[in-house]
Image (tube, rainbow, N blue to C red):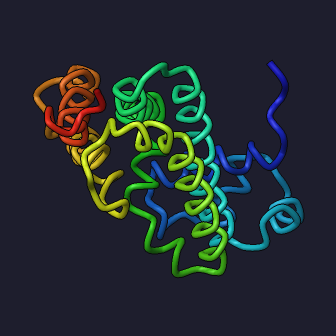
Amino acid sequence: MPKPSRKDSILTAALACITDVGADATTIEMIRERSGASIGSLYHHFGNKDRILASLYIEGLRRYAERLDAQLAAATGASECIGALVSSYIDWVVENPDWARFILHSRGRVEAGEMGEQLKTTNREHYARLQTRLQSYRDQGCFRDLPLDCFASIIVGPAHDMARNWLAGRLSKHLTDYREVLAESAWIAVRALPDQSPQ
């Protein structure tokens, strides 16, 4: 396995500090000490604390999107694609709980910061890839006639809510125990009704 870059080491240290004391209480000095980087290196790679936090947020989204893209590419039908949207999210949260917790609570902060436009661009590109992947199934009539603006929320919204509860310790079972039922429910919610299905 290749050695993490200095930039990755700084992001890893930032996430550890945020997990320990919260984003507001985390300081550049804490990140420097934990990462072993010099102050000059931190400012060279990121510029300031807000840019470190925004970069951490965007990198987390990138890694999640990378996992999702791979699972969608492997799916062989509409129902598998919908299932991949749910399962890839749940799997990423379970494998990266601290990162997921940070992302769930920091969107507004990042959007309002100097890298807000970069985040919006990242999200637009992600949703464009998703729509392209699903378009052929939409053209085949596999999905109900739903507004595009709410399509993804209908699919991933319940998993998103369950992830929040799991991360907060409010579920009686592990998040992965709900993986199949959430994927099945998402498919039921968006699949074409019997009289609308392609013949």
The location of residue 191, given as percent across then percent down, is 24, 36
* Above or below, 39 relative to 144: below
* Above or below, 120 relative to 146: below
The residue lying at 67 percent from left, 63 percent from top is: 52
Left or right: residue 183 compared with residue 122: left
* Front position in the image: 71 or 192: 192
The location of residue 109, given as percent across then percent down, is 48, 74
Q: Quadrant of residue 173?
A: top left
Tag count: 0
Quarter holding the N terminus? top right
* Front position in the image: 139 or 2: 139
Quarter holding the C terminus? top left
The location of residue 61, given as percent across then percent down, is 56, 49
* Above or below, 102 relative to 124: above
Residue 169 visible? The answer is no
Left or right: residue 122 compared with residue 111: right
* Above or below, 114 relative to 100: below
The residue lying at 20 percent from left, 25 percent from top is: 178
The location of residue 142, given as percent across then percent down, is 33, 35
The residue lying at 83 percent from left, 64 percent from top is: 39
* Front position in the image: 84 or 143: 143
Q: Quadrant of residue 162?
A: top left
